[in-house]
Structure formats: structure tokens, C-alpha cells
Image (cartoon, helix red, strand yellow):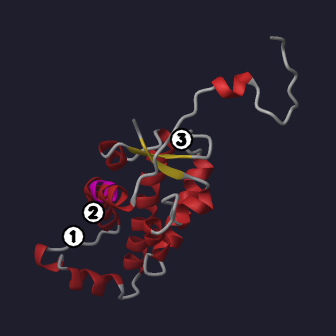
Amino acid sequence: MGLVATSALEPSIESVLEPSILVRAAGMIRRTLAFVVDLGFLLPLQVLFFCGLRLGQRLPLPRLKELYPDVLLANLSDGSLSSQALCISFVAVSVAYFVFFWTLRGQTPGKWLLRIAVVDVYGERPSLLRSLCRAAGLVVAVLPCALGVLWIGFDREKRGLHDFLSGTYVVHVP
């Protein structure tokens, strides 16, 4: 039996022998649970940042009875400079938290506990620019009644609007 020449269009023996890596996309429930875990880490950071902001402006810290959701929403929507700074700081701290962990490890603490990770098309953790794009996309995906995030439940690849905009996937980690 002799060697048979193959054209460039046919697969060579090297491409057949390369191992293929199968990945599974993380679904809506696992991603939501990871987000809930991340909120457990993020909310104390937000409270510390809020206290520092209030003390920096020489404003008193709210009493315990002022921490009900209706009172908080009324204070946030009063149009004062303090409430605007608080809203901006909430978004900034949240974005910084997610971008830091996505860029550093590809996983937030919640994603690490649930064994899922954010990867780019090549299976690598996202770059800083890609993580910033993903965070901006997440803000946009949440604004219209979270429709961009809910899309994860209907998409074949389990990607939300923020994943499409940034070119990322959320996959199970072995």
C-alpha cells in the first residue's frame, strides 16, 4: 500500500489526531445562582463604599429604620447630589467588581463556587477591554426589564446580550 496524496481541502492526519475539546455552556439557573452568590460578596462592598461616601460628604449615616426599601427608593429618587453620587457609585463598584474578576481569573467568586467561567472565543479568560465591554453590555441588557439577560434561557448557546456584544461565553469548568 502506497502513500496517497490528498488535496488541501481534505483533512490531514494531524488534524484528525488533534484532540477536540468539548465544552458545555452554563445555563440560566447556574448563572443566576452564581450571581446571587456574587451579590453576597458585592453588597457588603457597596455598604462600605456607601458609608465612606456619606462620611466623606459629612452626612450622617442612616438609622436602621431608614433602611426599608421604600425609604431607600424615596431617598435615591429625590434628585439630590448625594443620591446621584450614590447611584453612580453603585454602578461603578459593581462594574469594577465584575471586570476585576473576569479579567483576573475569568470567574467571579460565585462562578468559581458553581464551577463556571467566562471565556472568549478561544477559550481564554477575557481581556480587560472585553471585560469592560461585557460589563457595559450587562448594564444595557438589564435596563429593558432584563430582556437581554432573560435571553440566556432561550438561546441555543446560552448567551445573553452582554455575551454577544463582548464575544464571550459562560461554560462549565471541569
Amino acid type, residue under disc 1 in the picture: Leu
Q: Secondary structure at mark 2?
A: helix
Distance, label 1 to label 3, CA atoms, is 39 Å
Q: Nearer the viewer, residue 37 or 164?
A: 164
- Residue 87 position (above or below residue 35): below
**Residue 168: numbered disc:** none
* Contact check, label 2 and label 1, Cβ < 8 Å: yes
Which quarter shows the C terminus?
Answer: top left
**Residue 51: numbered disc:** 2
Amino acid type, residue under disc 3 in the picture: Arg
Residue 102 location (% of width, % of height): 48, 47
Residue 92 location (% of width, % of height): 46, 62
Q: Which residues are magenta?
A: 34-38
Q: Secondary structure at mark 3?
A: loop
Residue picked out by circle 3: 125
Residue 141 location (% of width, % of height): 50, 71
Residue with the most extreme top position: 1
- Residue 130 position (above or below residue 72): above
Lateral position of residue 6 relative to residue 102, left or right:
right
